[in-house]
Amino acid sequence: AQPTLAVVGATGSVGTVMLELLSSRRNVWGEIRLLASARSVGKRLSCRGEQLTVHELTADAFDGVDIAMFDVPDTVSLEWAPVAAARGVTVVDNSAAFRMEPDVPLVVPEVNKEALRDRPRNIVSNANCTTMAMIMAIAPLHREYGLRELVIASYQAASGAGQIGVDTLHDQLSKVAGDRLLGSRPGNVRQAVGDDLGPFSAPLALNVVPWSGELAALGWSSEEMKLRAESRKILGLPALKVSATCVRVPVVTGHSIAVHAVFGSEVTAEGARQALRNAPGVILVDDPEAGEFPMPIDAVGTDPSWVGRIRRAMDDPRALDLFVTGDNMRKGAALNTVQIAELLAAE
Ligand code: 2RA
């Protein structure tokens, strides 16, 4: 019999993409059960061409479920993933709640699917969307040249902060549209945008905001710390040097990352391109003269990480500079979760 899948957080923005993917990918599932908080109960959502009713997230709702994909806040995952796991459900969790637990694998199928084998808590974690886009490009280069260090700047889209992030960006854009003096005098963009900053710490329209997540140790943001810790865990490089600066930009969907990667052996730009051409889940877009480079407006709605602007560093023959863009809602969240669930289903 085909396995039963639960989607926990089915009404959220990532949940919505999960249902789209379940409808468009090869169908490996028997029943698909949609679960969410009490306020969404009774909503009808379309999946695989059928209308499914959303049920309340309760312990009994996991009866008969084989695999559950969770996209809920960390606190909800912390409470409910162990409840499901204790009932024999294998949980694939997209929150940060379990990612760094030593007995929970953090899996990107194209990079470390062997980590799936060892899951004593019946929980598997999905990486942060920024880590995900970057790691797809970096893992094949690591296999080729042996990674030593990453220096990264991210350009993160509003949808990484949820639908509220997208709504806030569009509201702000309509407030600033048409006034050509905005952005050429101190404070006038703040004034036009007003006090409603939504999930961001400053106006996002006509601006970039060098902050994402919460304050962590020594002035680093939680997002920057996640990039470091998750890259180390996924690549199995516990001493990898990682310095990240995470920045929110006025883009709807598509996280981009500028990467300076230092390796153990000498690199060439063409060797790197060849490694990336052969890598699953990666698309090479690297013809700057023709205006071809990775950008969110092109990568949105697609599955792979788009990689380009590949250069050997001018001052270090063992370092590459490159630019990556990936759809943070798909591979960055829903798609990777679905891919892991499909691997579990095949077991
Ligand atoms: C963000 N990576 O972009 C975080 C969470 N999805 O805000």
Image (tube, rainbow, N blue to C red):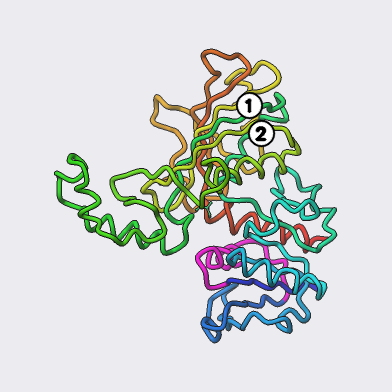
Q: From the top left corner, tell me how far across and down residue 251 is, in percent.
A: 39, 49
Quadrant of the rendered structure where residue 340 is?
A: bottom right
Tell me if 50 is positioned left or right of 163 in this view. Answer: right
Q: Is residue 326 above or below residue 263?
A: below
Q: From the top left corner, tell me how far across and down residue 144 is, in percent.
A: 71, 26
Q: Is residue 252 above or below residue 208?
A: below
Amino acid of disc 2:
Asn
State the CA–CA distance, disc 1 to disc 2.
6 Å
Residue that mark 2 sits on: 278
How many other residues sit within 10 Å of disc 1, few (<14), some (14-19) or many (≥20)?
A: some
Q: Is residue 209 above or below residue 59?
A: above
Amino acid of disc 1:
Gln
The residue sitting at the front extreme is: 218
Task: Read off the magenta span.
Answer: 10-30
Residue that mark 1 sits on: 274
**Label 2 near label 1: C-beta < 8 Å?**
yes
Quadrant of the rendered structure where residue 2 is?
A: bottom right
Quarter of the image containing the N terminus?
A: bottom right
- The numbered disc on residue 15 is none
